[in-house]
Image (cartoon, rainbow, N blue to C red):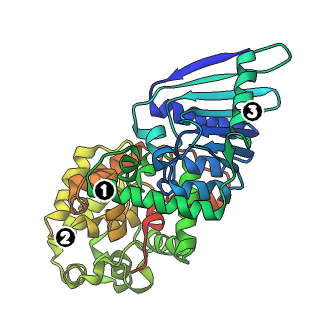
Amino acid sequence: MRKSRIFSTPESFGKEFLRCCGEYASLHVAVAWCGDPGKTLPYKHLETFKGSVVATVGTAFNHTHPDAIEWFEHIRAYIRIFDSRLELFHPKVYMFTSGNRYAIFAGSSNLTYGGFYTNVEINALIEGTSGKGKQNDVRNLKQCLSQWHSDTHSFVPTQEWLNRYRRAYEANARKERKNAIRTPPRAEEDISTASWLRNADWSIYYTKVVEGLEQHERSGQGYHDVLDAAERELPVPWRIANFDDIEKRRIIGGIKAYGWLGHVAASGQFRHLLAGGSTEQHRIIVRAVNRMAGFTLPIDWNRLEASLRDLINLGFTMKVWGRLLCIVRPDVYCTVASPSVRTNLSKTLTVAQKDFERPEGYILLLKLIHASPWFNSIEPKDTIEADVWARRVAFMDAIFYKRT
């Protein structure tokens, strides 16, 4: 039986593409251009694809990012470059197969973040089984894909060719930026590298956590140690007496061994508030923390903002209070103490970095997180993954952390 569907929203297209990555054994890609793999999606979907990948890619107008070509080689795909001297290569086809089953996406989406998640696109999915004397159109498409991937129409990129192409791509990009020419590659370039965060599923998110830890030679246990200490020494409900204990103050402020998620007590003023603040100041902190720790999902954003303003009125920004909430409810709240977190996410939300220091900016970030597939995923079966999942919002710090 043959079924067809048309997708007019990025969400529906991306969801079905991801499903096919999990259900089929091979994939043939033929696209006019590919974006920067540094945007994470949709490339991470193909990295988790366990089957074989064949790709025929166009490079007309130097639109395809050279890193995409290297990326295909890295995942051991059979990549060829369509010879642009022949004609303009302009298809957008993704053909999944497994035995006699097939799923064909054809439409307007190139292999770019914009094509899968932000542009206005239309894509059709045709799914069915092939057999003798059936569906000549599918057979003709397979022949077309094979022809494009042959010596008559394309070539295997060598390192020498890639070096030349990279120089041409970068020269083109410099000219376009200098003259403020808005081309598709420049539009793709302007998309934040953190934009994937709103669309990633749990598998992608967890992979990014692991990669972040490895890149900076850190371990997940470091995060767990701090959060375990907070759970043990600072159980909810908080008490004013917590501020009389130096070890508890160190956990709250991220001092010494507790510096993961941000050393916010580096500010002498905040250290003074913890150790020498008035009883009323400590009462305000305890009351606000207990209230926000008890919020159930979905969050009442108005109540959250009111509680955050009680803390802000003590004279410190969300760089401080975000970390404090993060160690109390690592499944709900994130830290924005790290400058690299604020830098990466400012483009994603199209807000200034300093906005994350205010309640409204912090809430905007939480809304993005709480609407994402990875946040709303079910608990994984693997115990190590499940431990991270239980504290998944706090572990966002591992992805964007940069050693200074």
Taking the spot 74% from the left edge, 41% from the top edge, the residue there is 150
Where residue 334 sits: x, y (%)? 38, 60
Image x and y of residue 326, in percent: 38, 63
Q: Specify whether 158 is left or right of 6.
A: right
Measuring 59% from the left and 35% from the top, which residue is drawn there? 17
Query: Marks 1/2: CA distance?
Result: 39 Å
Which residue does the numbered mark 1 point to in the structure image?
177
Q: Identify the residue at image location x=34%, y=46%.
A: 367
Q: Which mark is residue 97?
A: 3
Query: In the visual, does 201 lie left or right of 185?
Result: right
Q: Nearer the viewer, residue 262 or 33?
A: 33
Q: Quadrant of residue 353?
A: bottom left
Left or right: residue 21 versus residue 201 is right
Q: Position of residue 175 (x, y in %)?
A: 33, 57
Disc 3 or disc 2, which is closer to the eye?
Answer: 3
Quadrant placement of the C terminus = bottom left
**How many labels were placed on the picture?**
3
Q: Identify the amino acid type marked 2.
A: Phe
The x, y position of residue 67, in whole percent, is: 54, 58
Q: Nearer the viewer, mark 1 or mark 2?
A: 1
Report the amino acid beneath label 1. Answer: Arg
Kind of residue at badge 3 = Thr
User: Disc 3 and disc 2: Cα gap in Å?
Assistant: 56 Å
Q: Nearer the viewer, residue 297 or 101?
A: 101
Q: Which residue is mark 2?
A: 316
**Residue 348 in sight:** yes
What SS does tag 2 mark? loop
> Mark 3 near mark 1, Cβ–Cβ under 8 Å?
no
Question: Is the residue marked by circle 1 packed among few (<14), some (14-19), or many (20+) residues within 10 Å?
Answer: few
Label located before the other in sequence (3 or 2): 3
Could you classify mark 2 by the number of other residues whose Cα lies within 10 Å: few (under 14), some (14-19), or many (20 or more)? Answer: some
Q: Earlier in the sequence, mark 1 or mark 2?
A: 1
